[in-house]
Image (cartoon, grey):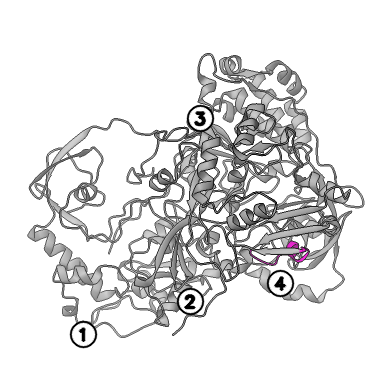
Amino acid sequence: MLGAGGSTSSYQEAEETDVVLLWGSNAREAHPIWFHHLLKGIRNGTRLYVVDPRRTSSAQWADVWLGLHVGADVALANTMAREIIHAGLAHESFIANATSGFDAYRACVEPYTLEHGAQLTGIPAEVIREAAHAYAKADKAMICWTLGITEHHNAVDNVLALINLALLTGHVGRYGCGVNPLRGQNNVQGGGDMGALPNRLPGFQDIRDDEARAKYEARWGVRIQPTYGWNLTEMLMAMDREEMTSLLVVGENPAQSDADAHHVEKVLRKLDHLVVQEIFLTKTAQLAHVVLPATASWCEAEGTVTNSERRVQRVRKAVEPPEGARDELWILSELAKRLGHDWGKPSAEDVWNEVRELSPKLFGMSYERLEKLGGLQWPCRTLDDPGSLFLHARLWEVPAQGRLAPFSVVEHAGPVEMPDADYPFLLTTGRRLESYNTGVQSGGYDSPLHRGESVDISPEDAAMLGVQHGDLLTITSRRGTVDAPAHIDRGLRAGVVFMTLHFPDDVATNLLTIDIADPKSGTAEFKACAVKLEPARVRGLARGTTNVLATAGTD
Amino acid sequence: MTGIAPHAGQVLSPLVRLERAGKRREVPMVECSIDGRAVRVEEGTTILAACRSLDVPEIPTLCFAETLRPVNVCRVCMVEVEGARVLVPSCSRPVEQGMVIHTRSERVMSARRMVLEFLASSVDLSTTPKAAEWIAEYEAEPARYGPPMPASDERDLALTGHHHEPSVEYAATVQQPVKVDNDLYVRDYAKCILCYKCVEACGPDHQNTFAIAIAGRGFDARVSTEFATPLPDSACVYCGNCIAVCPTGALMSKQEWDMRQAGAWKESEQSVTDTICPYCGVGCTLSLHVQDNQIVKATSPMENSVTMGNLCIKGRFGWRFVQPRKEPSS
């Protein structure tokens, strides 16, 4: 964050901070071991504010649950900001020393009075006021979020709105303070660190930075384009235009994981050449012209991953891969060779050492040190650098070192598709504790918590529709239709229904979701689309699923 | 085996002490004598930690874990402090200036012997690491309390306050049928010494799910879900953090239990490799226990700063997708 591309804090800080705003995150289920650190904090006196349209199992641990309308995050953040400014709680010396753009920001949030904010968010004005005061007055306070912030058409604005709050109150760059995206997959952070983004080089260096690019061009002996490439959503559009005709997919299942699945499958079928490198014959792999059987990189190969506290950690080979599966590094090297670049046969450590050599903030992380110290947190610039517990301490130096942290002017913009007379419910999506993404991995073990897919619905809506727990419903959006049994959830408010992506072979939730993406991040608005609910025509199935639902565990 | 569980909300003990960056402060030192040797340690260090920094003979522990607040229930780590009326639990008692400590005095040896006799006569210690060694070392004779009580399946039915006169012919035991009620883990409370570790790990120290607690009083006390319901009907979320701290093998993954039943569990042939969990971005270290190129168990190191030995259901059990399951060979 703030140009660094990672959480600013360490997990242990959640144990010792005074206030946590957990925003758009059900970490109790999606990041259970991070939540352990937060629970230690709660037992040490941390006050927890959970911002979520659903009263989740995380919200059950909150001092205050702020149950906002789906997509009203910027409105809530701006309302809190205005209240903080008007109550004289802004950190004026920090703003003056370390930030830029405050006047424009103040003007932007001025219309967001408590009353207006309450209208936009559905949260009582007094509750917004209390959360704003608690956050601003705390000695140490953190904001942590996950996909409830980033899976919106205005994802980047949402993130910027949260960063604004941290800058306004000086809650960044000190121990126990920070702005923290909790990463959803085991190497999302590492993928970004390695430049597996359309705008970055390894070490999160900007591809438009002439100096950084020249360094890589010299080392690699190739020319690197000086402009940003396509993100996933833009690639899908380019495939649709038949401008992009070949695709290599490594360990991802876009045919089921991406919004508006009908459309994704259609464009994947347009490709002249689709190569999928996978450990399973996923739905995407089934569409491929060539499938390259790969190893499970986390236990059948060597390497590193980076976690949500910027800690680079070793993954190691524990078992021999199945016959025929090849190490992913071998596959990529062989592909390079076929394309005219002989990389030799580099080991994972060789590759990592090249990364270190070219990325100053990772240089101190030799394999030897990673082994000995149980991982290191970047930046870690020298072989005696202990790594960085938190980022941006520079902002507290007088004068602040480096670039000033900019406030951003961001305005409320609700979901693209709001409920209307034809599609009266708002569908939001997320994860459950025992499952994961499209279920390719989590479908591999039996658990009493697995209960299959359902459409979670508030008791009020269930009563209105005359729906019983376990009744099979047909859920329809403007893009598709699926059937799923109803699961009555008292944590949901009227008008909002909830589903997951975990069982796409049974219930392809992404047939419903909307493929409108944030223009800056390319992330689709999985968290909001309009649907209608009707009793399913095939009544017989509902009975069978009722028993499964009856054993559902709760956290 | 009696003791008082710490209250929820109690401030975490400084015993949960991991080496953490940026947190070193100057701590005053205290001096003591252990088995005649002068020792200097940081104030707040437990007697056990001080002993482990020396090469004095090992002090046995059962209910102690670095990552849990001590509950002082097993009484096997007792040592003698000169001037103290009773023996003290070394796992929780901090060293004080000038303490004179004996770890192998006659009183200590006699107390440990008796604790081991009580435990071994009433509990199945066959899967408790080191139990047999300790019994030999301390010359404990559990058999002198008589043959074990015949098997009974009524332990879960015991009501608080309803005591029966003990039989003098047999050694009372906690024997009861093993509970196999789900695919993920097994509870064999005939092996339970009531050390509270699972209750603490499930409860306030780590997981905060509170699926289990101590039910009953006195010799009828046992670890139980609410109303002794099967796990799938309880609040359990199958993190298995109770298994991770169980010192006796009373709690065990179903896979390990099945393999042991079939005689296929060969710990000496297993390798343990640390890697990172393939699920969310928290980055929990998974120690993969591998036998015959099959992952047979996942744990996490207690001293790991991310996990403190804990995992969630996905980390503990969700790795089976990487390999076709092989039935345990008999």
Residue A499 appears left or right of A239: left
User: Do tags 2 and 3 sit on the same chain?
Assistant: no
Which chain is indicated by disc 4? A
What amino acid is labelled 3 in the image?
Lys
- Choose the circle earlier in sequence order: 4 or 3: 3
Q: Residues within 10 Å of mark 4 (few under 14, many from 20)?
A: some
Q: Secondary structure at mark 1?
A: loop
What amino acid is labelled 4 in the image?
Thr
- In 3D space, how far apart are the residues under numbered discs 2 and 3 (Cα atoms)? 47 Å
* On screen, residue A543 above or below A500: below
Mark 2 and mark 4 residues within 8 Å of each other at the beta carbon: no
Question: Residue B180, labelled with which disc?
Answer: 2
Magenta residues?
A279-289
Circle 2 or circle 1, nearest the eye? 2
Where is residue A166? Give x, y as percent: 60, 28
Question: Residue A140, labelled with which disc?
Answer: 3
- Choose the circle earlier in sequence order: 2 or 1: 1
Question: Residue A546, labelled with which disc?
Answer: 4
Question: Residue B169, labelled with which disc?
Answer: 1
Please state which of residues B100 and B317 is positioned toward the viewer in this rendering.
B317
What amino acid is labelled 2 in the image?
Val
Mark 2 and mark 3 residues within 8 Å of each other at the beta carbon: no
User: Do tags 2 and 4 sit on the same chain?
Assistant: no
Mark 3 and mark 1 residues within 8 Å of each other at the beta carbon: no
User: Do tags 4 and 3 sit on the same chain?
Assistant: yes
Circle 1 or circle 4, nearest the eye? 4
Residue B172 sits in quarter: bottom left
The quarter of the image holding the N terminus of chain B is bottom left
